[in-house]
Amino acid sequence: MVKAVVLGASGGIGQPLSLLLKASPLIDELALYDVVNTPGVTADLSHISSVAKISGYLPKEDGLKNALTGADIVVIPAGIPRKPGMTRDDLFKINAGIVRDLAKGIAEFSPKAFTLVISNPVNSTVPIAAEVFKAAGVFDPKRLFGVTTLDVVRAETFTQEYSGQKDPSKATVPVIGGHSGETIVPLFSKVSPSFDIPADKYEALVKRVQFGGDEVVAAKDGAGSATLSMAYAGFRFSEAVIRASKGEKGVVEPTFVYLPGVPGGDAIAQATGVDFFSTPVELGPSGVEKAINVLDGVTEREQKLLAACVEGLKGNIEKGVEFVKNPPPK
Ligand SMILES: NC(=O)C1=CN([C@@H]2O[C@H](COP(=O)(O)OP(=O)(O)OC[C@H]3O[C@@H](n4cnc5c(N)ncnc54)[C@H](O)[C@@H]3O)[C@@H](O)[C@H]2O)C=CC1
Ligand SMILES: O=C([O-])CC(=O)C(=O)O
């Protein structure tokens, strides 16, 4: 039996993500929570003739508790999205508190669930969730994931003309680091099956992966950021976590994790100088089975990208940790 929960289920990401989860044969029970509109979204999805039994909750009448109780996997796309001219860090002011409060709920009502954080800025919201779990004495770093799959999906798509794959997802393109601008580092030297990026295209491709989110924000022109591609990516990562939890071997996806707490993470923490970092991980029944170090043998250009990434990440991580340890005055 697998119970999945979406926190922020009525939003631009939440609705299509909930649709994909409802349609997945891997899920037996699906609970939707949001501060608005869950009755409607739930009624609509409940007519779909798939396996998952669906229920919807609002904050009233212990809604968060009832949604989370018994959860195996909790996905969090709650929070405001960007508008043109904003950075992901500009979302911190509002989303930090939202993620902190939802993480408190998870710590209380479903402390053993896999927690997948989509809400931006991921580089800070994942450290926030970690600190909340630590304070509650329930932190299991193998079960906390920042969802960076959209960066991987974009890298697969944008390199298709060079990978030559009919199905672009068949190319493995590691994207590591964080989830904002220069903290996003595609490692084109480590693609498999291997292919070459023409030298005159390299820089533009790196930038396109790093700033793919801005492309969508600009195109939506004030109406938000990526929602449909994010729902696809969030579902792909959720499915990977569930498949591995059911015993499937060899499930590997990059994700933003707390390195000192996961097998194989220490070496990556030492090499980068940061505790939170997105790296390919092998997933298993209890979450992260092994963080895979893809840093050895990177090119000089990739080393430069990594240096800029770590510079940015440090501040983002610290900001999240501080928000919980020394909360700002109300
Ligand atoms: N990790 C990633 O790659 C990506 C992350 N994002 C982020 O995902 C977040 C959501 O984006 P959208 O769905 O487009 O926004 P949206 O505004 O359409 O939906 C957000 C939903 O969260 C709900 N919400 C707000 N406070 C809540 C709370 N305390 N508890 C439960 N639900 C709450 C809102 O009612 C709304 O339904 C944003 O922070 C965005 O930046 C977006 C794209 C990619
Ligand atoms: O760009 C944004 O604000 C949303 C996001 O994280 C992405 O699309 O990668």
Image: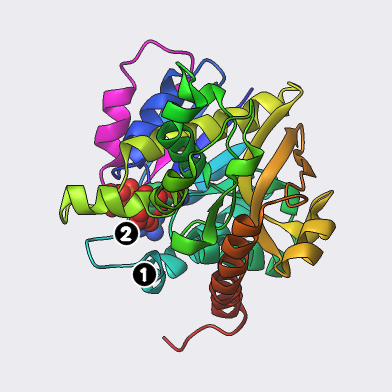
Q: Residue 319: image x %, image y %?
A: 54, 77
User: According to the image, label 1 marks what residue?
Assistant: 94
65 inside magenta stretch: no
**Label 1 CB-ligand 1 distance < 8 A:** no
- Magenta residues span 32-54
Q: Do callouts 2 and 1 mark residues in contact (Cβ within 8 Å)?
A: yes
In the image, taking residue 118 as reference, residue 9 lies left or right, namely left
Q: Name the spot of residue 171 as percent of width and height, x first.
A: 56, 27
Identify the residue shown where x is 55% and y is 42%.
Answer: 74
**Would residue 78 be visible to someone looking at this image?**
no
> Which of the 4 image quadrants contains residue 107?
bottom right
In front of the other: 164 or 1? 164
Q: Is residue 197 visible?
A: yes
Residue placed farthest to the bottom in the image? 329
Q: Between residues 214 and 40, which one lies in front from this camera angle?
A: 214
Q: Quadrant of the N terminus?
A: top right
Q: Is residue 267 above or below residue 227?
A: below
Residue 57 figure quarter: top left
| Location of residue 47 with respect to 260 vertically, above or below | above
Q: Residues within 10 Å of mark 2 (few under 14, many from 20)?
A: some
Along the horizontal axis of the image, is 318 left or right of 167?
right
Q: Which mark is residue 80?
A: 2
Please state the horizontal and vertical placement of residue 330, each as a whole percent of the image.
Answer: 41, 86
**Pointer 2 or 1: first along the chain:** 2
Residue kind at label 2, given as amino acid type: Ile
Amino acid type, mark 1: Ile
- Could you tell me which secondary element the residue under label 2 belongs to? loop
Residue under the image location 39 percent in, 36 percent down = 231
Q: Position of residue 13 (x, y in %)?
A: 34, 41
Does residue 108 appear to the left or right of 99 in the view shown? right
Is the distance from the Cβ of mark 2 to the nearest ligand 1 atom less than 8 Å? yes
Horizontal side, residue 186 vs residue 291: left or right = left
